[in-house]
Amino acid sequence: MLLSLGFICLTFVSLVRSEPCVSSSQGLPGIPGTPGRDGRDGYKGTKGEPGPPASSLKMTEFKGKKGVMGSPGPKGKAGPMGTPGLSGDKGVTGVRGDSGMPGNPKRDLQSAFTVARTTIQFPQKNEPIIFNKAISNDHKDYNVATGKFTCQIPGLYYFVYHASLSSNLCVSLYVGEERKVSFCDHKTNEYQVSSGGSLVQLTKDQEVWLAANDYNGMIGVSDHNSVFSGFLVFPE
């Protein structure tokens, strides 16, 4: 019985489906819905095939535009000196200058002086005697401030002094710190003169001076002069 009832129902449904639905008119389109959300990111694709080598491409096709020139960088270190260049052409001869004053080559080998002591005071004992007035001293080899002669031209020199004395006097001639010669005179008159001299071999920059010991009665006043002289005899 149940089987017969099922068959009847199935036949009824088939009849209903076979009849087409008839509509009198088509309805209007509905309002569009709101856009849906973005979908999820897709899965990472597989690695592609290698491209052609860069050397096979024409790089000029991919060259970009020329950029703006940058500011100059700091100055670098100087490089090694290059090879000398060729000599230039000889210049034009200049105009001849005016003639100079006639020279005197012999003057370069001259040295001479005479100086005087102009005081009534006795010189300091064992100190250079100061002859403070230059009578002749063209090359300034004698220093009137220090009382010393400085050799500028090596050679053989002659030095001599003439001293007025009012008391006993002993004078020594020094070269550097070495005493070369000494002369003494004991006073017997109111005024009298003592003198002495010597040849001395000198090298450049050696100094020569006179000094008195405890007997230092040298003076230098009008009509009673005391002088010291020296000159080059033979240059080396």
Image: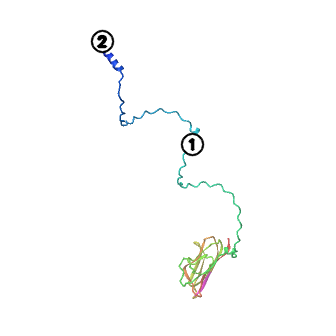
Q: Position of residue 203 (x, y in %)?
A: 63, 70
Q: Residue at x 33, y 20 (%)?
A: 16
In front here: 124 or 102? 102
Question: Farthest residue in the left direction?
Answer: 1
Image quarter of the C terminus = bottom right
Residue type, numbered disc 1 = Glu
Q: Which residue is mark 2?
A: 4
Secondary structure beneath dot 2 equals helix
Identity, as a three-letter code, of the amino acid under mark 2: Ser
Q: Position of residue 169 (x, y in %)?
A: 57, 82
Around disc 2, counting alpha carbons within 10 Å, would you say few (fewer than 14), some (14 to 19), or many (20 or more)?
Answer: few
Q: Earlier in the sequence, mark 1 or mark 2?
A: 2
Q: Secondary structure at mark 1?
A: helix
* Residue, disc 1: 61
- Eyeballing the image, is 155 above or below 121? above
Q: Pick whichever, 21 or 9, lies toward us.
A: 21
Q: CA distance from mark 1 to mark 2?
A: 85 Å
Residue 83: x %, y % from top left: 65, 55
